[in-house]
Image (cartoon, grey):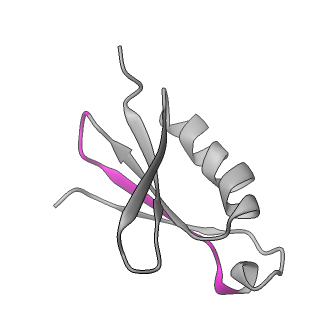
Amino acid sequence: MLDPFDIFKVEQNGSVKWLRAIADVERAKSYVVKILVIAAPADYLILNQRTGERIIIQAATEQRDGCSESPSVALSSAA
């Protein structure tokens, strides 16, 4: 069985780059917030392949500039 939560990095031009799949949403969110946003500040998208639900994790502008502020999390549903 394939892991149902895909993680994508949102590029500056609006395209997305697939990074990996993870088995559950909490692990996916934790991976993005604790590892990806710190290593490469950007916006990330978690997509639930089963339901189409999307979770967008946005790195704060200050964090992108080198400050250590927590990222904000915005939820949106599939179109």
Residue 60 painted magenta: yes
- Residue sitting at x 59%, y 70%: 42
Q: Which residues are magenta?
A: 50-61
Q: Quadrant of residue 30?
A: top right
Q: Residue furthest top?
A: 1
Q: Is residue 5 above or below residue 63?
A: above
Residue furthest to the left: 79
As drawn, is 59 to the left or to the right of 21?
right
Q: In x, y percent, where is residue 25?
A: 49, 38
Q: Residue 10's x, y, as percent?
A: 45, 67
The x and y percentages for residue 41 are 67, 70
**Quarter the N terminus occupies:** top left
Front-most of 68 and 16? 16
* Number of numbered discs on residues: 0
Q: Residue at x 75, y 86 (%)?
A: 65
The residue depicted at 62 percent of the width and 51 percent of the height is 32
Residue 51 horizontal side relative to residue 7, left or right: left
Vertical relation: 45 (above or below) 18: below
Q: Which residue is at 37% across, 21% downward?
A: 2
Quadrant assignment for the C terminus:
bottom left
Image quadrant in which you'd find residue 76? bottom left
- Residue 74 part of the magenta-drawn span: no
Q: Is residue 23 above or below residue 35?
A: above
